Image (cartoon, rainbow, N blue to C red):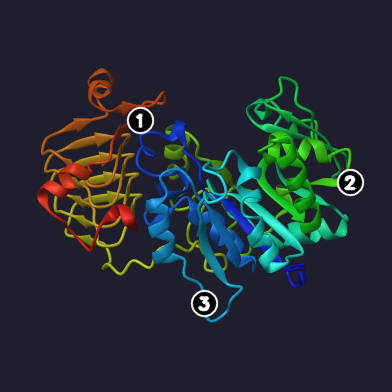
Amino acid sequence: MLERRHPERVVAFVMAGGEGKRLRPLTAGRCKPAVPFGSRYRIVDFALSNLVNSGIRSVYLLVQYRPQALIEHIRKGWALSPMLPDQFVTVVPPEMHTQARAFQGTADAVYQSLRLIELHHPDLVAIFAADHIYRMDVRPMIWFHRDHAADVTVAARPVPIEEAGDFGVIAADSNGRIAAFQEKPECPTAMPGDASHAYASMGIYLFTTSVLLEALDAAHKRSDTDFGRDILPRLLSERSVCAYDFSTNAVPGIKPYEETGYWRDVGTVDAYFAAHQDVLGAEPRFDMFNPQWPIYSSNYQGTVAHVLGGQIENCLLGAASKIHPGARLRNCIVRREAVVESDAELEDCIVMDYSRIGRGARLRRTIVERHNDIAPGETIGFDAARDAERYHVTPGGVAVVSHGLSSFFARGVRGSGFGYAE
């Protein structure tokens, strides 16, 4: 099936302006798509990798909230071939020259970028959210769109019916034609042929270009600003709007032990923490290593991880990280140029770039943001009341040590460069 070709010219817009309020304090100084994930990635890398691996390489990244970290990451890690004018990942801010306003919603963001669509004359426009962890081959969705003569196709993920009330639900018939959108319904409509599941919208849309342009122009005149809330419900009575079943999407290289159709919205710190547990283990739910469908990221040139000693069980270590003798780590992710000193004990922790865990410190279920020095002998994750006085503690009991940029400057630059810019 994957040998099929899509001759259509596709331009993608990736919505990367999200503030991510529920993910704070991880988004206090950066937008949600720029938040680090795993031992070397940023959240945005997953959407971009899916597009590029699918042969869609004309990509505009629409940014707004605290974009600098994301801009620097794209500059350093996502430079496609400059010799081919239709291969690029380009950051696009709001068009402030016509009127002093930021993006008012997803549809308004694309409306402000209409000149970019007109520049390329694509057959199809793909609109992707930038803040989910997943793998997806976009080509079968394109084939589905073409085979069903759809004007708009919405990616839909089956979720258990009892959990569907937490999502935007799609009611569709057996041919995939969408009849209604239901926003966090009390009684969600089941998906065709399976009363135990409902379709949840993934925030991924494929538009025939002429339909998109017409819809955006009409929406602008009505002051409508959002695809999910405004444009798509209106199009149901006028156009062919279809649901593409994400569970049928086949990505090369997926291992038998991985969760079928893995997709996570890491919109809260607890969800973000849980997704990190999914990439650990001998048979992880989401295996980050897939040579047939790689996740691309920055071209960091640091050395490999340096383990001087200690006990390490079920961990991922980023480049140039250093583990000293006597340290004990279990179920942890340690990102690049982070240091764990002798006799420190970490369990179920995420240590971000350029941080140092002092000698004898004990951490459990803790996220340590970038550029932090955890004092020798410090304990985090063992006394919830004490942790809440000093750190952000989630409803699930995860302690977050906020960004330590001030201490980073106080001791001088360590490592290869400014971590916030990569």
Quote the CA–CA distance across marks 3 and 2: 40 Å
Asked whether residue 38 is in view, the answer is no
Front-most of residues 51 and 18: 18
Quadrant holding the N terminus: bottom right
**Cβ–Cβ under 8 Å for marks 2 and 1:** no
- Local secondary structure at mark 3: loop
Mark found first going from the N terminus, 2 or 1: 2
Place of residue 420 in the rendered image (x, y in percent of width and height, measured from the top left): 31, 52
Place of residue 161 in the rendered image (x, y in percent of width and height, measured from the top left): 71, 28
Reading the image, the residue beneath label 1 is 398
Reading the image, the residue beneath label 2 is 175
Task: Choose mark 3 or mark 2, whichever is in front.
Answer: 3
Place of residue 107 in the rendered image (x, y in percent of width and height, measured from the top left): 66, 44
Quote the CA–CA distance across marks 1 and 3: 42 Å
Task: Choose mark 1 or mark 3, whichever is in front.
Answer: 3
Instruction: Kindly identify the amino acid type of the residue bearing the numbered disc 2.
Output: Asn
Residue placed at 71% from the left, 41% from the top? 220
Residue placed at 67% from the left, 67% from the top? 119
- Local secondary structure at mark 1: loop
Instruction: Kindly identify the amino acid type of the residue bearing the numbered disc 3.
Output: Ser
Image label count: 3
- Local secondary structure at mark 2: loop
Q: How would you rate the neighbour count of disc 1 (Cα within 10 Å): few for under 14, some for 14-19, many for 20 or more?
A: many
Give the answer, above or below, for where 266 lies relative to 57.
Answer: above
Reading the image, the residue beneath label 3 is 81
Give the answer, above or below, for where 142 lies relative to 360.
Answer: below
